Amino acid sequence: MRLTPFLMFTGQAQAAMDFYLSLFPEARITEIERYGPAGPGAEGTVLKARFELGGHSLLCIDSPPVHAFGFTPSISLFIDCDDEAQLRRLFDGLVEGGQVLMPVDAYPFSRLYGWVQDRFGVSWQLNLP
């Protein structure tokens, strides 16, 4: 069995992957299929893609139907960072165009932690254990 986070975008999947790949060293797209002229999504948008961040696989799509929902902070991608510099670099990059949900600080549950929602609505919790 393998658990894989699945991110559903509406026309922004490629931009989101490019953004994430710019922030995570050794990140890469491992598989991508695009909609053709027959649809149902807009031609060239992401039918299905698999990409890796930190050695972990994620899936994403551009959903052709517009839904009445988006991402919610109640589900996050949680990263245990290797050091403070990595945590702060990821936090500063991910929050660009997004919003801070909890600023980087020491909390009773973590010596250093920050929580952001990125410009695409995806929530990231960054932790220094």
Image: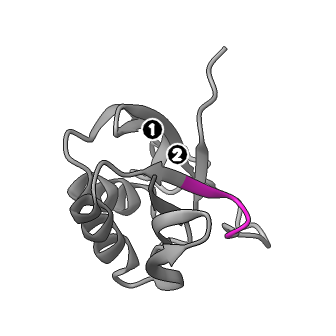
10 Å crowding of disc 2: few (<14), some (14-19), many (20+): many
Q: Position of residue 13 (x, y in %)?
A: 45, 56
Judge by depth and name the residue closer to the eye, 78 or 28: 78
* Residue 14 drawn above or below residue 38: below
Specify whether residue 11 is in view. Answer: no
* Circle 2: residue type: Cys
Place of residue 78 in the rendered image (x, y in percent of width and height, measured from the top left): 54, 53
Q: Are marks 2 and 1 in contact (CB under 8 Å)?
A: yes
Quadrant for the N terminus, please: top right
Q: Secondary structure at mark 2?
A: strand
Q: Which residues are magenta?
A: 73-77
Please identify the dominant SS of the magenta region: loop
Q: Residue furthest top?
A: 1
Instruction: Classify 10 Å Cα crowding around label 1: few (below 14), some (14-19), many (20 and above).
Output: many
Residue 122, position as x, y percentages in the image:
55, 65
Number of residue marks: 2
Quarter residue 38 falls in: top right
Give the residue number, with chain letter if any, for mark 2.
Answer: 60
Q: Quadrant of residue 128?
A: bottom left
Q: Colour scheme of this structure image?
A: one colour
Kindly identify the residue that appears in the image at 27 percent across and 55 percent down: 83
Residue denoted by label 1: 49
